[in-house]
Amino acid sequence: MHLYKNIKSFLMDQEYFIDIYDKYLHVYEFIDILVLNEQEISLQLEKFKLIVKGSDFRVLKLTKNEILVSGKVLEMRFIS
């Protein structure tokens, strides 16, 4: 378990972390959820706004500053 904690600490020791894999979107260190529905997710991060468009979005995990969503990502934009 010690190796897992070291790797997680290394990956999460950043201002933000955005990961897209298979049919999942993972965002770490967001400030606020602006829009959240089946076709669009808009998150406020410290230095920009992240807008993700797609289909069949469903929240699998949500904490104070982390979200994991399943669905099909079609478009992603960063707005400063």
Image: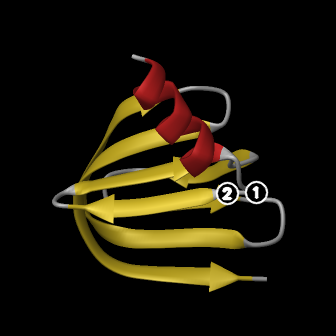
Q: Is residue 76 left or right of residue 32?
A: left
Residue at (18% x, 57% y) in the render: 23
Secondary structure at badge 1 equals loop
Q: Residue 53, labelled with which disc?
A: none
Eyeballing the image, is 22 above or below 13? below
Mark 2, residues whose alpha carbon is within 10 Å: few (<14), some, or many (≥20)?
some
Q: Residue furthest top?
A: 1
Rendered image quadrant of residue 43: bottom right
Residue at (16% x, 60% y) in the render: 22
Eyeballing the image, is 20 above or below 14? below
Q: Residue furthest right?
A: 47
Rendered image quadrant of residue 78: bottom right
Q: Position of residue 34 (x, y in %)?
A: 66, 53
Residue 47 in sight in this render: yes
Q: Residue furthest front?
A: 3
Amino acid found under the numbered disc labelled 2? Tyr
Residue 40 in sight in this render: no
Asked whether 36 or 4 is in front, the reply is 4
Residue at (48% x, 40% y) in the render: 7
Rendered image quadrant of residue 74: bottom left
Q: Which quadrant: the N terminus? A: top left
Q: Position of residue 65 (x, y in %)?
A: 66, 36
Q: Residue 15, labelled with which disc?
A: 1
Q: Residue 16, labelled with which disc?
A: 2
Q: Position of residue 73 (x, y in %)?
A: 28, 70
